[in-house]
Image (tube, coloured by chain):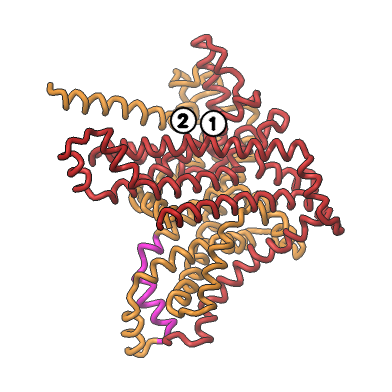
Chain colours: A orange, B red
Amino acid sequence: MTKRKVRKYFNIIIFSIVGLFWVYPFAIVFINSMKGKRGVFQNPLWFTKDFSLANFKTAFQALDFAHSFFNSLLVTVGSVILITIISAAAAYAISRVTGPFSSIIYYICAGTMLIPFQSIMVPLLSLFGKVDFLNRTSLIIMNTGLSVSLSIILYYGAFQGVSKSLDEAAALDGAYPFKTFVYVIFPAVSPMTGTVIILNSMKIWNDYLLPSLVINKNGMYTIPLKMYSFFGETNSEWQLALAGLVLSMIPIIVLFLLLQKQVMTSVTEGAIK
Amino acid sequence: MLIKKHQYWAFVLPALLFIVLIIALPFLIGIYYSFTDSNGLRASFIGLKNYQILFRDVIFLQSLWLTVKFSVVSVLLINLFGLTFALIVTSSDNRFNKALRTIFFMPNLIGGILLGFIWQFIFTSAFKAIASSLNISFFNGWLSDPSTGFWGIVILFVWQMSGYIMLIYVSFLNAIPQNTIQAARLDGANKWQTLLFIKLPQLAPAFTISLFLTLANSFKLYEQNLALTNGGPYRSTEMISMYIYNTAFVNFQQGYAQAAGIILFLCVTLISFLQLALSRRREK
């Protein structure tokens, strides 16, 4: 073997070890979710003879999984649809009309992005609490308000890249701005729409803090909320808690494996812009 | 002008309404709150008193200091890991490296609560098993000790964020023209020299972005903190976000909590302006 080849294999071995180390926390959760209590106690680091899938049934019921999944889906899809429509429309107008209003709106967006959620959660909650409006609908409204700024800025960049001659051509054909936007300009930035949908879905699907403050009725719990309360009930029955964790992670991991490339591009775009 | 005035407002108003109602208005009310002794039901104006008490509040100062310490440590580690991973996965374009990229990024998909529970299992059960099989007490009771508990949150956060930061470095590494690297090679530069003199300088903007992204994220960290240690033992691993939450929603000192929230805002804003100033200066 040449020196080059030796080095190549050496690198592959080292990198594999790093990769295994990184994936091991997931592996250990999967492995122990398929054991009985004794198996977890005997050796939590690897498989034991104690194998059973019964934990999943228990966890599925305790998490009220079908319900929680539906609640998470409802809140995520509802918020993301609102965010996409509202921010695309606003970004379109401020990218096409240059003037003081447009720059002010752009700076409002950039400015509000700086505000951490923890700095507004107390007044926000007391505001909605005073009018007794704390449920899934208000959660969707709050998610939208919290995500619109970043989405406008992302869309603004995308619309700047679409030539204004497209607008003019559509106008010559007799289309109103609304029609031009819906049928010509919005479809032209669909890669950015993908990014906006993915970024916001990930954030809202995984969110715990805001839903925990807004939702107080058991039947309305999203997956992270239910997982948190289930964890408290398991009383160090780790195999049950871990089965619950596996169930909670499956939807997003499956979706990620299907849309891998798009997800990673979107995340990078969201960070850099 | 293709868009008429009333049409312009029809496009813009919904977004403005949401931003004002959900962020701007609560933020302004919040500033007022921070000057009151609100307990959620009643509030009267007390001026700067909250802020004066905050700066003598040992638990607040401890949580602020812990957050700063946590941020510095995790920023360094995450960027070190993120850059290393980026160099690994861009070293050649094959399936193995693509799989590695996926693996490194995966933790970033999972929400903070689930991540916290995963690592709680590792630090309690798995570490205990390692400790008893190797007979090393170093691995015992990680989450019941303030200092190892702190490092536990750091480890969790590094595991979560490194893959994210890796992606930023990867996109900047891919933007370096191949012929620059080849030219350096032809001039006799070895791998380390290319890295040090060609690649790293090109990565300067990526450094700024990653540095401040991690900084801002670690200042806002809450869920991982909650699910892993819940601030324990004895509030010793409670970071600023959790301090605000507990003060507002456990002790119901909402005016006081809001003053801490304003301080958090000032910290994050300061960080963002530093970033802006730094990247402006480089562009000159």
Chain where mark 1 sits: B
Residue displayed at 33% across by 36% down = B100
Residue B90 is drawn in which quadrant? top left
- Residue A61 in view, yes or no: no
Total residue callouts: 2
Residue A269 is drawn in which quadrant? bottom left
Residue displayed at 12% across by 21% down = A1
Callout 2 secondary element: helix
Callout 1 secondary element: helix
Image: A164 above or below A84:
below
- Residues under labels 1 and 2: Cα distance? 8 Å
Q: Badges 1 and 2: C-beta atoms under 8 Å apart?
A: yes
Give residue B145's position: percent from left, percent from top.
65, 23
Task: Decide if residue B170 is on the left or right side of residue A24.
Answer: left
Residue displayed at 35% across by 77% down = A184
Chain where mark 2 sits: A
Residue wearing tag 1: B119
Image: B179 above or below A197:
above
Give residue A206's position: percent from left, percent from top.
53, 48
Decide whether residue B25 is among the magenta residues: no
Task: Decide if residue A131 is on the left or right side of residue B101.
Answer: right
Magenta region: which residues?
A176-194
Give residue B102's position: percent from left, percent from top.
36, 41
* Amino acid type for the residue under numbered disc 2: Pro
* Amino acid type for the residue under numbered disc 1: Trp
Mark 1 crowdedness (10 Å alpha carbons): few <14, some 14-19, many ≥20: many
Q: Nearer the viewer, residue A216 or A7?
A: A7
Residue wearing tag 2: A25
Indicate the quadrant containing the C terminus of chain A: top left, top right, bottom left or bottom right.
bottom left
